[in-house]
Image: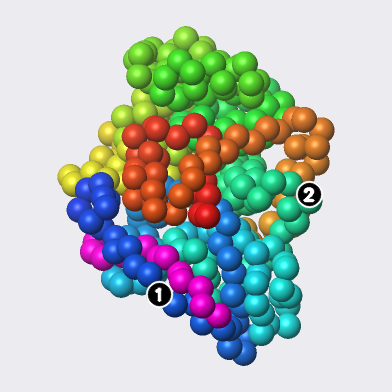
Amino acid sequence: MDKTNRQFLLAKRPVGAPGRDTFDFVETPVSEPGPGQILVKVEYLSLDPAMRGWMNDAKSYIPPVGIGEVMRALGVGKVIASQHPGFAEGDYVNGALGVQEYFLGEPKGFYKVDPKQAPLPRYLSALGMTGMTAYFGLLAVGEPKAGETVVISGAAGAVGSVAGQIAKIKGCRVVGIAGGADKCRFLTDELGFDAAIDYKSEDVAAGLKRTCPKGVDVFFDNVGGDILDAVLTRITVGARIVICGAISQYNSTDAVKGPANYLSLLVNRARMQGMVVMDYVSRYPEAMKDMAQWMQSGQLKSKEDVVEGLETFPDTLMKLFTGGNFGKLVLKVS
């Protein structure tokens, strides 16, 4: 097999924002799979804020990427050779394929997907880890009840846009916080949010007062920092705050900015709880079934922002931290 694999390896631990020099771009020959292994031609990669955390040498829910290792990324691709009883040539799979053109190894945690049922990028957005994060973060941790007010930060992003739509399906009043008039219009006009706050042109605290006159019952937070602080001043008694992410803090070279208004949790007997989607793996099938039904009925829409070219990876990744992506950021490899 005379194929060449193009790969991005982690060259160093970034301080602040990662750049091109954080990675080494290498070319290596592709070999045949050994016993228990599969060879996958990677077609699409999921670019996620969590990737920034995986570059840090710090204790987390998953070991960091080692220096000199292929940068970790979830993806979908086609099996082109197999020595594994569970996967055959021609199968399409979802798994941690890495930022490279070909994956060779044991398919740990991989599962099959059907490109006839949905376009492949969708298995990295609403029908993938992103959708699972929104589903379990909102329903299992946030526990919204019909008629409650749910606020979502990073609402036009991959997870936020899905979480908001699920809250609408469950009969809640939904307010999204996003950056820019286009994203805010998308939330209300396309996704059916009840209101949107443009943090780039409006004071968030004032926006919350305007859009949540009765307060906030559930806050699904993807951003952290000042926005979390603003929402804490508006929560109701018994409110639930889901800490899904804190993208405002990931590239900071200063200490993480903690919630200054956390005493509001005490006054309102509210709870703030972190969530990691891997804790719900055993329940993915039920979520996938619900999500697929909602998509078929038109209640749930998925927006993917697909950028072409593996070589663009370092620059494309940075779109996540500048708000440059609109929807789920996906890299088309070939």
Whether residue 237 appears in this view of the structure is no
Left or right: residue 296 versus residue 93 is: right
Left or right: residue 308 versus residue 225 is: right
Q: Quadrant of residue 93?
A: bottom right
Provide the residue designation for mark 2: 117
In the picture as drawn, the residue positioned furthest to the front comes out as 2
The secondary structure type at the circle numbered 2 is: loop
The secondary structure type at the circle numbered 1 is: strand
For the record, the magenta segment spans 1-13
In the picture as drawn, the residue positioned furthest to the bottom comes out as 35
Q: CA distance from mark 2 to mark 1?
A: 34 Å
- How did the renderer colour the structure? rainbow
Question: Is the residue marked by circle 2 packed among few (<14), some (14-19), or many (20+) residues within 10 Å?
Answer: few
Give the percent coordinates (x, y) of residue 281.
63, 62
In this rendered view, identify the residue nearer to me: 278 or 295.
295
**Amino acid type at image mark 2:** Gln
Question: Is the residue marked by circle 1 packed among few (<14), some (14-19), or many (20+) residues within 10 Å?
Answer: few
Judge whether residue 259 is colored magenta.
no
Q: Quadrant of residue 70?
A: bottom left
Provide the residue designation for mark 1: 28
Seen at 38% across and 39% down, the residue is 319
In this rendered view, identify the residue nearer to me: 235 or 244.
244
* Of callouts 2 and 1, the N-terminal one: 1
Seen at 60% across and 34% down, the residue is 303
